[in-house]
Image (cartoon, rainbow, N blue to C red):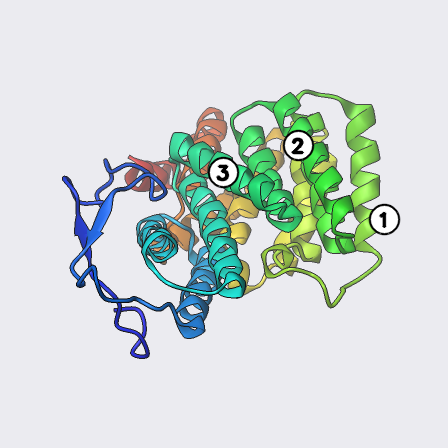
Amino acid sequence: MISQASPGPLLVAAGSSPLTDEAPPPWLAETTTSANRAGEWRISPEEVELLSGAADDNYAIDQQFGANRLWRPTRAHLLWTHHMIDRGIYDDALGQRLHALAGKLTTSLGWFCYDAGLQTQARQYFSEALNAANYTSDDVLASRTLSNMARQAVDLNKGREAVRFAKLGQRHAELWNAPSRVTALLAIREAQGHARVGDVFNCEAAIKRAWQEWEHGDHELDPDWAHFLNLAELTCLEGMCRLDLGQVARAQDLLARSEALQDVAHSRNRGMCLGRLSVAAVQNGDVDHGLAAATQALRLVESGMSSTRTTAQLTIVHDGLIPHRRARGVGDLLEQIRTHVA
């Protein structure tokens, strides 16, 4: 039951359960209804608002704890939303809200799968979200989704693809006069792609654009999904670019500054920052600070962080510390990391 105002039908699987991991994506799942087919299921605005609020709540949880435990419930919400679209009765205005909600849930689901290490599923959901954005001329959704796709492409070592996604996102951003926070995000996504392929010139130019846009400050039109890009995060993302370019001293300085600025609400990003700070410090010959950063990142995982990306970063940290395993404290930390990432 979604809302007391309108009980609606219950989902009944056609074949295997539509909520299993092996089920088809929600927009292809075949469902029937236990309600009388002669009856009417009128969708209320409150039901749509409830699902939209749940999506926002899950996004906030992701920022603090990671997304390993979020993609399944979000998939269920998306399945229900498509069921409402296909089976419910609503006017045009509410129909537009339902389709917008489906797009929002689809790109969020892609991001949650990405953070959970489910890269194939993430790309599938991102692609569907982009299709939905193009079908409904939703340039805001397109900008958000392409930013997500650019970030994933960097992690998959597809720097050129990341640049293409970021630039396409920038073109969509122009169509809705996106605020500076969004254009800064897309610029730093482009910079990350250039950094991954070692293109110093274009990376520097994109970083400069990102900071120029950021300096315009907050705007009332800043979308919720871009609020994570605060000073700490933009500093961290530049530090990641510097690390990919081999500028390890500069990367260590930026990542250390970012880590000091991070807050509890963005603990997952702090964990990612600490992992990269550890890598940068070790590569810069500062093993003590690398060990300290890695220890803090591990403590976040031990405290309940649920992000495959964060634990994968610990694996990189582990491998970087192996040559220094005889240094004080390193051997013990390596053993602790192996315990958590095994």
Crowdedness near tag 2: few (<14), some (14–19) or many (≥20) residues, C-alpha within 10 Å: many
Q: Which amino acid, mark 1?
A: Gln
Q: Earlier in the sequence, mark 3 or mark 2?
A: 3
Q: Which amino acid, mark 2?
A: Leu
Residue 325 appears at what percent x and percent y?
A: 43, 30
Residue 77 appears at what percent x and percent y?
A: 35, 56
Say which residue label 3 marks.
126
Say which residue label 1 marks.
212
In the displayed structure, would residue 126 be above or below residue 83?
above
Say which residue label 2 marks.
243
Question: Can residue 329 be seen from the camera position used here?
Answer: no
Q: Nearer the viewer, mark 3 or mark 1?
A: 3
Distance of label 3 from label 1 (alpha carbons): 28 Å
Residue reaching furthest to the bottom: 5
Distance of label 2 from label 1 (alpha carbons): 21 Å
Q: Secondary structure at mark 3?
A: helix
Displayed quadrant of residue 1: bottom left
